[in-house]
């Protein structure tokens, strides 16, 4: 059963809901549940906070009993997101009704990122390399599904660095809705006219510390979808010099598994950084050597210069999982290299 509790909104900025006498941090997707005001009686899902989850450790408003029961669905739509759940709602799919000419459209290159934390540095680096290009974001499964949850996306759109935001498959709430991931990637060319696409999960990521049971496997689906429609496909690796977890230190096991399982070759951008930023793992080889071994002669490694100082001065996020850029420069260097490689793929 859903772990639902009644509560009363105590504060709205940031949102705090009082549940059984306890003031608890919360989040409301106002596009779904409507406006939330102080004093409103709400029902919240308390599961994540009770479990003490890191990135999702807050209650989520399920319904506003005070003012959220008068919503009217949009007329003339029949396609559902979150279909057959209590949160199902009608959307207008970005996939065009007539796709007869889709096969002739030029396909923009697609960069598949393993984490939402790679989005901002990758977009910044791509636009720094080729300022006039349009880069759009296709949000996939693997992390948070609500498109409205990401502060990074909102800032990138406000600053004109992102050309648009599509939520694909089970993800919802972006500027455009795609029924399928491949439909969203196709629409980037046939409907939206983007020069390049970054595909990856929303904030947070699912994980069970197993080889296949994690949200990072979404990168495998994204890469295969991009390859299937003929896009130049880049897969950005998840790298870290500061993560305390051995499975994510150096080359993350998430990225290693995806690169091993891919059914076709892809381009793998690698940052050109000082040797001391590449950690030596307890498992044996250095992280750079491990990446070489995983890719062997199958995937195309593209070594790219990165501008860590420029990104640090950009005002975009420089913190990941409690670590600042200076504490884990390799983590940020990886998407900076990916963004630069994506821009080069656009220019040929």
Image (cartoon, rainbow, N blue to C red):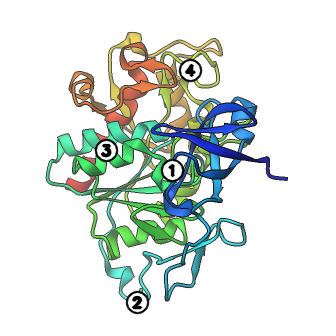
Cα distance, mark 4 to mark 1?
43 Å
On-image quarter of the C terminus: bottom left
Cα distance, mark 3 to mark 1?
24 Å
Which residue is identified by label 3? 155
Cα distance, mark 3 to mark 4?
29 Å
- Image location of residue 40, percent across then percent down: 59, 51
Relative to 13, 63 lies left or right: right
Which residue is identified by label 4? 249
Cα distance, mark 3 to mark 2?
36 Å
Which residue is identified by label 2? 100
Q: Residue at x 74, y 36 (%)?
A: 208
**Residue 326, placed above or below residue 123:** above
Residue projecting furthest to the front: 39
Q: Is residue 35 visible?
A: yes
Cα distance, mark 2 to mark 1?
48 Å
**Residue 343, placed above or below residue 171:** above
Residue 59 falls in image quadrant: top right
Relative to 85, 321 lies left or right: left
Marks 2,1: beta carbons within 8 A: no
Q: Is residue 223 visible?
A: no
Q: Give the mark nearer the N terminus: 2 vs 1.
A: 1
Relative to 129, 103 lies left or right: right
Which residue is identified by label 1? 37
Q: In what element is the residue under mark 3?
A: helix
Between circles 3 and 4, the one closer to the viewer is 3
């Amino acid at each position: 059963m859903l772990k639902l509790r009644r509560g009363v909104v105590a504060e709205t900025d940031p949102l705090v809901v009082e549940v059984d006498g306890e003031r608890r941090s919360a989040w409301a997707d106002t596009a779904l549940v409507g406006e939330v005001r102080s004093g409103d009686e709400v029902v919240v899902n308390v599961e994540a906070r009770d479990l003490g989850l890191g990135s999702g450790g807050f209650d989520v408003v399920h319904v506003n009993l005070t003012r959220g029961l008068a919503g009217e669905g949009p007329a003339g739509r029949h396609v559902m997101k979150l279909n057959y759940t209590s949160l199902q709602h009608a959307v207008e799919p970005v996939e065009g009704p007539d796709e007869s000419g889709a096969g002739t459209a030029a396909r923009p290159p697609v960069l598949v990122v393993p984490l939402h934390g790679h989005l901002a540095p990758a977009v910044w680096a791509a636009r720094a390399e080729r300022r006039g290009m349009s880069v759009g974001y296709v949000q996939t499964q693997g992390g948070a599904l609500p498109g409205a949850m990401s502060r990074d996306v909102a800032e990138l759109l406000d600053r004109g660095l992102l050309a648009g935001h599509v939520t694909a498959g089970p993800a919802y709430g972006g500027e455009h809705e795609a029924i399928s991931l491949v439909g969203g990637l196709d629409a980037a060319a046939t409907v939206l006219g983007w020069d390049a696409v970054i595909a990856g999960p929303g904030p947070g990521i699912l994980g069970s510390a197993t080889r296949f049971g994690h949200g990072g496997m979404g990168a495998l689906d994204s890469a295969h979808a991009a390859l299937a429609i003929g896009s130049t496909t880049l897969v950005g690796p998840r790298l870290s010099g500061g993560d305390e977890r051995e499975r994510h230190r150096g080359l993350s096991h998430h990225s290693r598994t995806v690169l091993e399982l891919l059914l076709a070759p892809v381009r793998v951008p690698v940052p050109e950084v000082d040797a001391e930023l590449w950690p030596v793992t307890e498992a044996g080889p250095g992280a750079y050597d491990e990446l070489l071994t995983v890719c062997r002669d199958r995937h195309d490694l593209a070594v790219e210069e990165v501008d860590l100082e420029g990104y640090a001065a950009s005002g975009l996020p420089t913190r990941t999982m409690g670590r600042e850029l200076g504490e884990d420069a390799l983590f940020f260097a990886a998407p900076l290299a990916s963004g630069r490689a994506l821009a080069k793929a656009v220019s040929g």
